[in-house]
Structure formats: structure tokens, C-alpha cells
Amino acid sequence: MLKIAWLSILMTCLSSGDWHYNMQQAEQIAKKEHRHILLNFSGSDWCGPCMRMHNEIFESEVFKEMADTQLVLVNADFPRNKKNQLPAQQQQLNNAMADQYNSQGKFPYTVLLDANGKVLREWDGFPNMTPESYTIDVRNGIYADR
């Protein structure tokens, strides 16, 4: 029951666009829709910069508008509070994403990928940018790949 409640809370917290939690599914969508993937590693219940990133950047209208047409959003969350622990299957998916893209365990850590999972650009920590500047930075990464 707690796991279902946690997923409901997470879905509400990440309400900007459709966030996915499985990289294989995200890659399939990205290939089908000719989009890039933005993978964000967060600690939703302990990482202040992660919460700030979601609130200030990912929830901004300018970012959401761009993401709705150009990105598949993926969140790999690593909560610490016992009451927020992920279901085992989701934890395994997140661990696999971390092994591949965030082996140093940085938070927040955001990676722009092409539809095949190739890293195009990385942001380590909270980007000290306005939502508009961050959105332009992401777009530059997308267009650099074309």
C-alpha cells in the first residue's frame, strides 16, 4: 500500500509532462517519435537541489513546452526515507540506469541522450540557469546531434 501511495506522490511531483521510469520503454518511444531522452537522477525526499530542479526548471512552462515536442522524460529517483522506498522492480530499473549513466552517484544529475541511449550532454548538479537558459541549453544539445 505504501508503494502505491509513493508512486502516486511521485507522479504528482513530476507532473511536468509525462515522466517515464523505464529506459527501454523510453528508448522505444524516442525512436518511434524521433525524440531525444532527458534522464534525470534525483533524490526526491532528501536532495534539495533535486527538488529545486524539478520545481524551478522542469515545472516551468518554457521547459514543458519544449519537452512536450522534443523529449522523452525519464526520472531515476533514489529516495532515502523508508516510507518512500520504491518497489523492488523499480529500484532495479533505477540501479541499472545509474550503473550505465551515473556510476558516480551524483544528484541531481541530468543526461541528454539520443534515441539509442548515446550520451549527448550532461548537467552535474543544479544548473545555475533560468528555465529559459536551461531549455536553450537542452535544445542546443538536441540540435548538435542532428
Image: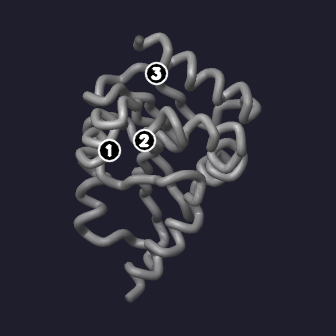
Q: Earlier in the sequence, mark 3 or mark 2?
A: 2
Give the spatial CA distance, label 3 vs label 1. 17 Å
Quadrant of residue 105 within the rendered picture: top left
**Foreground disc of the pair 3, 2:** 2
Question: Residue 71: image x %, image y %?
Answer: 47, 36
Give the spatial CA distance, label 1 vs label 2. 6 Å
Q: Residues within 10 Å of mark 3 (few under 14, many from 20)?
A: some
Q: Is residue 31 left or right of residue 9?
A: left
Q: Residue furthest right?
A: 130
Q: Earlier in the sequence, mark 3 or mark 1?
A: 1
Q: Please, is residue 139 above or below residue 49 in the view? A: above
Give the residue drawn at x 28%, y 39%.
Answer: 27
Q: Is residue 74 left or right of residue 99?
A: right
Give the quarter of the figure containing the C terminus. Answer: top left
Give the residue drawn at x 29%, y 37%.
Answer: 32
Q: Residues within 10 Å of mark 2 (few under 14, many from 20)?
A: many
Residue holding disc 3: 121
Describe the element under mark 2 as helix, strand or loop: strand
Residue holding disc 2: 72
Give the quarter of the figure containing the N terminus. Answer: bottom left
Residue nearest the observer in this picture, 12 or 85: 12
Give the residue drawn at x 51%, y 55%.
Answer: 43
Question: Residue 137: image x %, image y %?
Answer: 61, 21
Residue nearest the observer in this picture, 75 or 73: 73
In the rendered structure, find residue 62 and report the number of the disc placed on it: none
